[in-house]
Amino acid sequence: DAGVIQSPRHEVTEMGQEVTLRCKPISGHDYLFWYRQTMMRGLELLIYFNNNVPIDDSGMPEDRFSAKMPNASFSTLKIQPSEPRDSAVYFCASRAGGRDQPQHFGDGTRLSIL
Amino acid sequence: RKEVEQDPGPFNVPEGATVAFNCTYSNSASQSFFWYRQDCRKEPKLLMSVYSSGNEDGRFTAQLNRASQYISLLIRDSKLSDSATYLCVVNYLILSNAGNNRKLIWGLGTSLAVNP
């Protein structure tokens, strides 16, 4: 079975550029999550969707960050303009409905802003 | 107090040792709990869910203590391949005027190195 698919795996770009991260959740999963992971802050939830609708975006650091889920099989996380402090690993995860269902993570996108 | 706290380690143990990690949480309304494992430069993967009565999966045992608000993970007969970071995850109930909501809160992880 295909897991959560993220692209790109690595992204290196200069500050000020727009960055778009992509995610395809596991088919049939109702929930999709975007996380950011750094050494200092660990894994931080940025936003999550239920049935393509954003439910909680309180973790989005500022207006430079935006996320969309136009359909059940695709989501994007966009940073515009990017800054060096955005450098981190960004994970997408999905899970089935039901309170205790575990999350399944993609391989992550390693983002470096120069 | 942090919502979810873990001893960052690192724990360095020899092969075959038994090692235990604790994780404390602050929200008494927390409903479900998980242990995830994350290898270096990889994504987190579910190790096991934690049930009220405690549960065991091979060499791994997870326990929940609601009164003291902590969960634990015990690894017996540790292997070199157990070297990883172990993340504690707590499913919080957040009460608000707009309605109750649940949110997963992740610990920063405990690093384990099993040595030959």
Image (cartoon, rainbow, N blue to C red):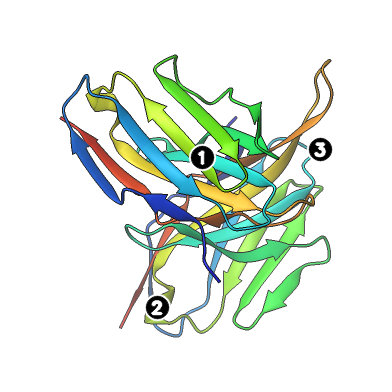
Verify CB contact (< 8 Å) between mark 3 and mark 2.
Answer: no
* Percent x, y of residue B90: 67, 46
Query: Can residue A15 be seen?
Result: yes
Residue depicted at x 26% and y 48%: A10
Count how many numbered circles sit on residues in the image: 3
Q: What distance separates the C-alpha of mark 2 from that of mark 1? A: 34 Å
Do the residues indicated by labels 3 and 1 lie within the same chain of the protein?
no
Query: Dot 1 lies on which element?
Result: strand
Other-residue count near label 1 (Cα within 10 Å), few / some / many at <14 / 14–19 / ≥20? many
Q: Quadrant of residue B25?
A: top right
Q: Nearer the viewer, residue A47 or B97?
A: A47
* Percent x, y of residue B7: 49, 49
Q: Chain of mark 3?
A: B
* Percent x, y of residue A5: 45, 56
- What residue is pinned by disc 1? A75
Verify CB contact (< 8 Å) between mark 2 and mark 1.
Answer: no
Q: Which numbered circle lies on residue B49?
A: none
Residue depicted at x 82% and y 17%: B98
* Percent x, y of residue B11: 40, 63
Q: Which numbered circle lies on residue B81?
A: 2
